Image (cartoon, rainbow, N blue to C red):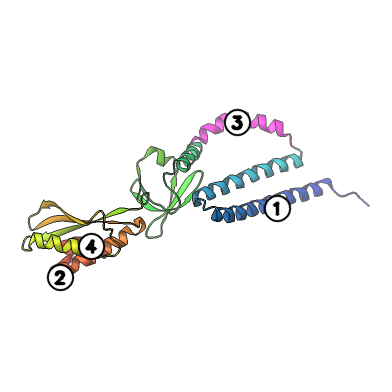
Amino acid sequence: MTDPDPMYFTLIKIAIILISSFIIVKWAMFILRKTGKKLNMEPTLIQVINEIIKYSVLAVAITVVVKEVGWDISGIIVSLGIVGVAVGFAARDTLSNFISGMFILADKSFKIGDIIEISGKSGTVMKLGFRVTTIKTTDNKIITIPNSNFSKNIYLNYTAEETRKVELDINIPYEMDLDVTVVSLVNAASNCKWVLKEPKPNVLIKEMGDTSIRASLNVWVSDPWKVATYRSQLAMKVKELLVGRDSSENVKV
């Protein structure tokens, strides 16, 4: 009876290592999610810790597999050190994205669920990873943004504060009584349940046009995630005040 091939046992060990690593990652992520909910941890922080655990376990698994195969780890490390300089130049963008991601997390510039805009692209933050941030637009388009862009460009966080101003541009025809119209607009806005009492709604006159007075109706709300919805509802209120006229010309949403 021949002895079993040593390579056979090596392959079994490697398979056990890889399967065990997969189970450890899944188990750790499950525990982290459960703990995160109990401790009310930020989803962004949970996601980053998940990635740290995943890549750490992967690195350990690869190291153990390499040892099982019989490769000289010290020699590999030296080789990687020599090649690392060249690779570093090629991977500098990846490193820059990683560092920028760490600064975003530390500064709490934005988090998962926030609505941001950068370089003319806006959407809800779906994922904040080590290299890239993923946002989803209002029409369900997925945009992937390298984290380094946030350190090079100005970006907006529309939901950083709990209160937001909703501004609606309006054209008031000259034949309408301006004082009465302004009071009516303010009253209509004040009657909306979602409009804050302070700061009070107001109408600002911007300029005198050829056929109308250009103004803006401004209100403050406590839910920054619904600004677009509130602006639409406000436009419907204004339309009721301008009934009998061409509302498409008098209201700009």
Residue at the spot of label 1: 19
Q: Amino acid at mark 1?
A: Ile
User: Which mark is on residue 83?
Assistant: 3
Q: Nearer the viewer, residue 140 or 231?
A: 231
Mark 2 to mark 1: distance in Å? 69 Å
Q: Nearer the viewer, residue 2 or 64?
A: 64
Mark 3 to mark 2: distance in Å? 73 Å
Q: How many marks?
A: 4
166 up-or-down from 236: above or below: above
Residue at the spot of label 2: 243
Residue at the spot of label 4: 190
Mark 3 to mark 4: distance in Å? 67 Å
Helix, strand, or loop for circle 1?
helix
Residue 68, by quadrant, is top right
Q: Amino acid at mark 4?
A: Ser
Residue 242 location (% of width, % of height): 15, 67
State the extent of the magenta-drawn residues as a range. 71-92
Q: Nearer the viewer, mark 3 or mark 4?
A: 4
Q: Residue at x 77, y 51 (%)?
A: 12
